[in-house]
Amino acid sequence: MTGPGPRAAVRDGDPPGGETVPSPPESPTAHRVPRLLRRLVAPELLYLAALGLTGVAAVVSVTLPAAERGELAANMVAATLGAAVGGLSLDTFLLSRPAGWVTARGRAWVLAMLGVSVLLSGAAAALLTTVAGLGSHLVGVGAAAGLTVFNTVSSFALRRRSFRLVYAVRAASGALLVGGYVALHAAGWLDGNLWSLVWLGVQWLSALAVCGLALVMVRRAGPVPPASATASDYRADVLAVGNLHVGIFAQMMTLRFNQILVARFAGAGPLGVYALAVAALEFAQAGAVVRAQRILADRDGADGPDPTKAVVRAALPIALAAVVGLAVLGFLQPEYRHAWVLGLLLLPGSLATAAGKSWSALLLKRRGERPTTAVALVTAAVAIPAYYGIIPWAGAVGAALASSLAYAVHAFGSRASLRRAQPPSHGTV
């Protein structure tokens, strides 16, 4: 076991394994400045910045008429859900693999998995766009492919603990999106499809940026030994992907399919308002997303304390602030005056989602894919009938109520299944 030793530094030019030379004394200020910089670029803050900029983009999009914003939202949900459905959950799968997995399998296998997932994502987005009856197939398919590339390739960087770099790319893409929206508004081009094309371009710029980051990491890692996996290892991978993806597919249908139904049964205007409320409440889940990714990237398992209570406590004030922000926006833009009501109805579900993300990640690490899949399938079995039963006659309000119910079911199921897990061992070899 290795760990921090005496305060010492190895000088450039020392032979490997050579003697260490004590570091020269440093002033307290020299210690405080790097520590302050690290805090300012902490992964959680960068992720919040990325979400914040995405939120600013959502606020700017409120300058669109509700129907045009609904067109933009339809393209976004078709692409994001298409990437989730067709992406085979490779990002989560790769994060949860043990150390050395990528080297053992070889690049050809990983690239083949990525290629298949990109094709499936595009097909799923095309189908969802047709079901919604809104949006552009070009934007839906193209953005779904870009999102799949970004999510999957980012998982390689996250496996190497490059949380700051990945989240910095996300923040930069958010800033670029805000700039694009502001430019369109300044030019007076208030067309939802045109704004969707800008969003599509930003997704692919982000994907290319993270691909460049991954290539740099591969080059720094040096020559890669030939794959050592056997045919049974590859079959096991396919089975594991299937088991994991069934659960995440069900979970994402629970999270996003309601917007497809709002588009189909309520129309573009109500979808524009509802999607704004959903986006605002997703701010509260930032800490839970980062915590879940850290749990999945932990090669030694998730045997530490359960962080969920702290995650929910941090999420509550953000969720309340989001509802207040929606009320202010509704006052300034009358077409969105009911957004705060939808946000209030979504608030319990948002907190349940924050808890469920943490518990679901812990469950995956401690018990494997099957229990997480079972929880997600039970949740979808509750959510999808509820969506179909209430959204056609209650519209966006029904979607918010059914969503909060579904998110609570997922959180409760994850926690109950986690309690049945064997307690993690500490201190064993």
Image (cartoon, rainbow, N blue to C red):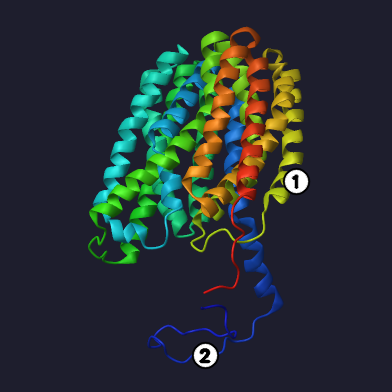
Label 1 vs 2, first from the N-terminus: 2
Between residue 162 and residue 113, name the one nearer to us.
Answer: 113
Q: Residue at x 22, y 63 (%)?
A: 226
Image point 42% across, 20% down: which residue? 128
Secondary element at tag 2: loop
Disc 1 target residue? 313
Q: Nearer the viewer, residue 162 or 122?
A: 122
Q: Is residue 317 above or below residue 330?
A: below
Q: Amino acid at mark 1?
A: Arg
Q: Is residue 268 visible?
A: yes
Task: Please indicate whether residue 296 sits to the left or right of residue 42 in the image.
Answer: left
Above/below status of 123 relative to 359:
above
Of residues 395 and 406, the one drawn nearer to the viewer in this rendering:
406
Look at mark 2 in the image and give the residue it sits on.
21
The label nearer to you, 1 versus 2, is 1
Question: Which residue does the image show at 69% across and 27% down from the upper left?
Answer: 346
Q: Where in the figure is residue 125, as x and y percent of width and height?
A: 39, 24
In the displayed structure image, the side of residue 56 where residue 104 appears, left or right: left
Provide residue 248's location: percent of width, then percent of height: 48, 37
User: Is label 1 in a helix, a strand or a loop?
Assistant: helix
The image position of residue 22, as x and y in percent, is 56, 89
Q: Looking at the image, which is closer to me, 186 or 205?
A: 205
Marks 1/2: CA–CA distance: 45 Å
Label 1: few (<14), some or many (≥20) within 10 Å?
Answer: some
